[in-house]
């Protein structure tokens, strides 16, 4: 796992962490939000990214972001098919969010209530929805997109 990219990431994460050893330090971090932007940015590892994973250190409250590769490979938080799900509803706001996206949206508070959560789960593979269900799904998807898709990203 030793590559120049990993060393760069490590040099970014360790000073923001409490533990001094990466293997322990990485476990202090949790995923707090994801975003897809339309402009390229850089992961601390040096790689160009459009998929941002915002992470927060549970012990000292520090926040930063890494790309979708580093979050899985190095921080070892599994984002599964979250970004695929996001891209799918970004292309078509009546599409079904996948399980990983539904769980993420629920955890992040993007869903208003349990009813929305169960509706998304129950219709996760449904191809044909009633007009009312379709409207509801669009409304929820647009809310998720508003929180996760960033156009013309402003520098932080
Ligand atoms: Zn990276």
Image (cartoon, helix red, strand yellow):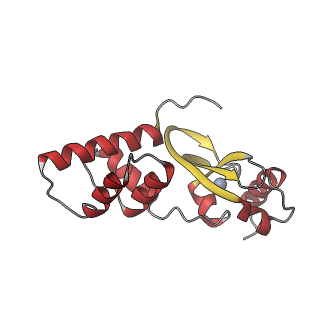
Q: Position of residue 6 (x, y in %)?
A: 73, 61
In percent of the image, x 78 and y 62: which residue is there? 25
Q: Of 36 and 17, which appears nearest the observer?
A: 17
- The quarter of the image that holds ligand 1 is bottom right
| Occupied quadrant, residue 1 | bottom right
User: Where, by quadrant of the figure, is residue 68 drawn?
Assistant: bottom right
Relative placement, left or right, of 87 versus 22 is left
Residue at (26%, 43%) from the top-left corner? 138
Quadrant the C terminus occupies:
top right
Position of residue 96 relative to residue 63, above or below, is: below
**In the picture shown, does residue 155 fall above or below 33?**
above
Q: Where residue 37 sits: x, y (%)?
A: 50, 39
User: Residue at horizontal 84%, vertical 61%?
Assistant: 19
Position of residue 56 in the picture relative to residue 129 (left or right)? right
Q: Position of residue 48 (x, y in %)?
A: 60, 47
Number of numbered callouts drawn: 0
Q: Is residue 59 left or right of residue 35?
A: right
Picture coordinates of residue 87, whole percent (x, y): 38, 50
Q: Residue at x 68, y 50 (%)?
A: 56
Above or below, 29 relative to 155: below
Residue at the extreme right: 20
């Amino acid at each position: 796992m030793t590559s120049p990219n990993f060393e760069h990431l490590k040099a970014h994460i360790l000073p923001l962490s409490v533990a001094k050893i990466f293997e322990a330090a990485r476990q202090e971090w949790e995923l707090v939000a994801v975003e897809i932007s339309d402009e390229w940015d850089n992961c601390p590892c040096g790689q160009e990214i459009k998929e941002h994973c915002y992470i927060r250190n549970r012990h000292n409250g520090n926040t930063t972001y890494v790309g979708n590769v580093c979050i899985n490979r190095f921080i070892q938080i599994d984002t599964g098919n979250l970004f695929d799900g996001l891209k799918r509803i970004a292309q078509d706001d009546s599409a079904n969010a996948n399980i990983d996206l539904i769980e993420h949206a629920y955890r992040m508070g993007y869903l208003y209530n349990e009813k929305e959560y169960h509706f998304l789960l129950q219709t996760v593979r449904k191809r044909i929805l009633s007009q009312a269900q379709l409207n509801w799904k669009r409304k929820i998807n647009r809310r998720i997109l508003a929180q996760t898709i960033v156009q013309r990203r402003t520098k932080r």
